[in-house]
Image: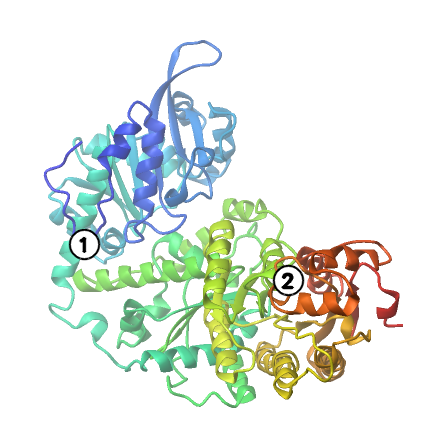
Amino acid sequence: MESANTNFKYVDYLWDDEKAKSLEGDEVALLLYRSNILGADLRITNYGGGNTSCKTIEKDPLTGEDTEVMWIKGSGGDIGSLTRSGLAGLFNERLHALKNRYRGLEHEDEMVGLFYHCLYDLDSRAPSIDTPLHAFLPYKHIDHLHPDALIAIAAAKDGKRINEELFEGQIGWVDWQRPGFDLGLQLEKCIQDNPGIRGITLGSHGLFTWADNAYDCYMNSLEIIEKASHYIEEHAGKDRPVFGGMKVDSLPEVNRKKQAAELAPTLRGLCSSHQPMIGHFTDNDRVLEFINSEDLSKLAPMGTSCPDHFLRTKIRPLVLDFLPAGADLSDAKAIREQMHGAFQEYRKEYAEYYENHKHDDSPDIRDPNPVVILWPGVGMFTFAKNKQTARVASEFYVNAINVMRGSEAISKYTSLPLQEAFNIEYWLLEEAKLKRQPPEKPLSRKVALITGSGGGIGKAIAEKFVQQGACVILSDMDQDRLEEARKEFTEKYGKDSAIGAQLNVTKPEDIQQSIQAAALAFGGVDILVNNAGLSISKTLEDTSEGDWDLQHDVMVKGQFLMTQAAVNIMRKQGLGGDVVNIVSKNALVSGPNNAAYGTAKAAQLHLSRLLAAELGKDKIRVNVVNPDAVIQGSNIWAGGWAKGRAEAYGVSVEELPNHYAKRTLLNETIVPDDIANGVFALVGGLMNKSTGNVLNVDGGLATAFVR
């Protein structure tokens, strides 16, 4: 498996001969390997975009005779992470037999249901709309990709001519047509009319390439994309500055991040008028090159070309060209009013787009808010139902920028006609796909910041939240502990589940940095859990002024400062919110050798009551969870606290857990997960009309009863 040239400039050559050799004899395994390495390069295809397939000879389970089976990425999959469970296996002969059932373009959608009658592998993923496009091509291995460079040619005004000249007739051309059975027939005809071609460019859409083994198919794809990319870069900026040159200067990076973090919660609130959204921010060089350019005002309203692009990003973005990059954002109310007008206009235009292009059987209008928001001089915001979808929307719009850049370099960019775009966006098959998605979890679309979440109670709360759908900001003073927790969350729940922010709750600069991190990563904050704390158990005479100040600074002042910062964000969003303070039974129960800690906890409890009374008008709920004797994973118990409490109760340190359990009414040991469950009970959606409450999670201590 060697090629004359594996040195590429514009794509990544990732084929590993040893890895491939270990898969020899298993064409499906080689398909998956090829798919994964193609999907690892976003210049080749975007997340969830494109499709790959192979054809093998299998035994018909009914006749025992050899039959050709096509293995293809199933509906809704991603080639970069494709596994066998994501494939559909279909009898290729039966797919060809469907030509006898095809009744024409007006009956396209009925063919998808017939794909199920062609299944060979009964454990298949749902077959995708691309199935006939692969079935009707007479090759063993096929790639359908969405490379920026090829789509730039496909979306160019005279793309067909460029395609013919650049590839010297080796790459065919099929004009834009919505994916479906008829497009498969058009690809088949293109092959018949142009024998010996290496691939086909689909107008405004993407690229098909093929070969009779996995490696040659891979190389064919790379070579064609490389050639197109080289051609575009040769022309970029040659006759005219890229995007017409710069109109706006970018702010320095630190200032960009600060401005973006300031505005993000306001944008998130406005984007959430229909349903709550999670945000993402990008200010990479390609984004800045586009949003700062002279051509932004011409190209952005045109919309995207490739269907996969606008399905993720909507047909066009909202451009904040009326707000200078260095604007003073301190008057949050005035900024929101200014943004509100722009959003109202965008929603109105989207409603008109829907009304002007809908069909009698079109699904109801969807969320009319923008997905992509461009702020010249600062960067790009994207908003969607979760972090992954928002991040992927950002990646797709970067792909769209690359396409516009390439098309403008070699010709003139063209977008899909609005009616064609609408027909894709409101396609009944797309609607059916949306309805097949699993129900959202209770904390989906929520962002939670938990202080002291590198371990113990805080980490357990963070993990519970992620499991229930939330995006989480882990925070801790100990950078090593924090990084260890962040890596664990990434491995278990994916890179979009959580970020880490080193945080000392007594330092206003740390608090602002953590809030900024939350705004840039997710768009804002919905839930604050004040969990950070420490314990010093000493007699009155042994308690120093420093002991007293430290505990009050961390737990009382820290809770105050964190809540103040989070509430500022929640008010900008206008979505309400939750503050949950992890206090202690010691806020209510008097015990020996505990003056500083118990007093701080009592102050935390009353501060919670005061803020519940004050913040109700903003729909921000403030509640308390009172744990007791949570020893597992706690930094508190790793210090001198355990020894001090053991001495106070006249038992050994080893006897403490049993001592605490025996004094409860339920005779139970309390662990971090118990506290996490208590916090979730308050924020999980069933207690949205409850505030100012105290929830004891202590196994039952009569002395700690609130009433």
Say which mark, if any, is on residue 229: 1
Q: What residue type is disc 1 on?
A: Ser
596 and 250: which one is in front? 596
Residue 546 is left or right of residue 323, and the answer is right
Q: Is residue 530 above or below residue 222?
A: below
- In percent of the image, x 24 and y 64: which residue is there? 405
Residue at image location 16% in from the left, 65% down from the top: 236
- 513 and 202: which is toward the camera: 513
Q: Quick check: 677 left or right of 292?
A: right
Nearest-to-viewer mark from 2 and 1: 2
Report the number of numbered marks.
Answer: 2
Q: CA gap, disc 2 to disc 1? A: 52 Å
Position in image of residue 387 (x %, y %): 49, 60
> Crowdedness of circle 2 by 10 Å Cα count: few (<14), some, many (20+)?
many
Q: In front: 457, or 214?
A: 457
Q: Amino acid at mark 2?
A: Ile
Q: Is residue 608 left or right of residue 339?
A: right
Query: Is residue 691 in view from this perspective?
Result: no
Quarter placement of the N terminus: top left
Circle number at residue 457: 2
Give the x, y percent position of residue 166. 12, 49
Left or right placement of residue 552 versus residue 524 in this view: right
> What residue is at 20 percent from the left and 56 percent from the top?
158
> Where the C terminus falls, by quadrant?
bottom right
Label 2 secondary element: helix
- Is 700 above or below relative to 644? above
In contact (CB < 8 Å): disc 2 and disc 1 = no
**Residue 455 percent across, percent down from the top left:** 57, 61
Asked which quadrant contains residue 683, the reply is bottom right
In the rendering, at what x and y percent does residue 171 appear? 18, 41
Q: Is residue 37 above or below residue 643?
A: above
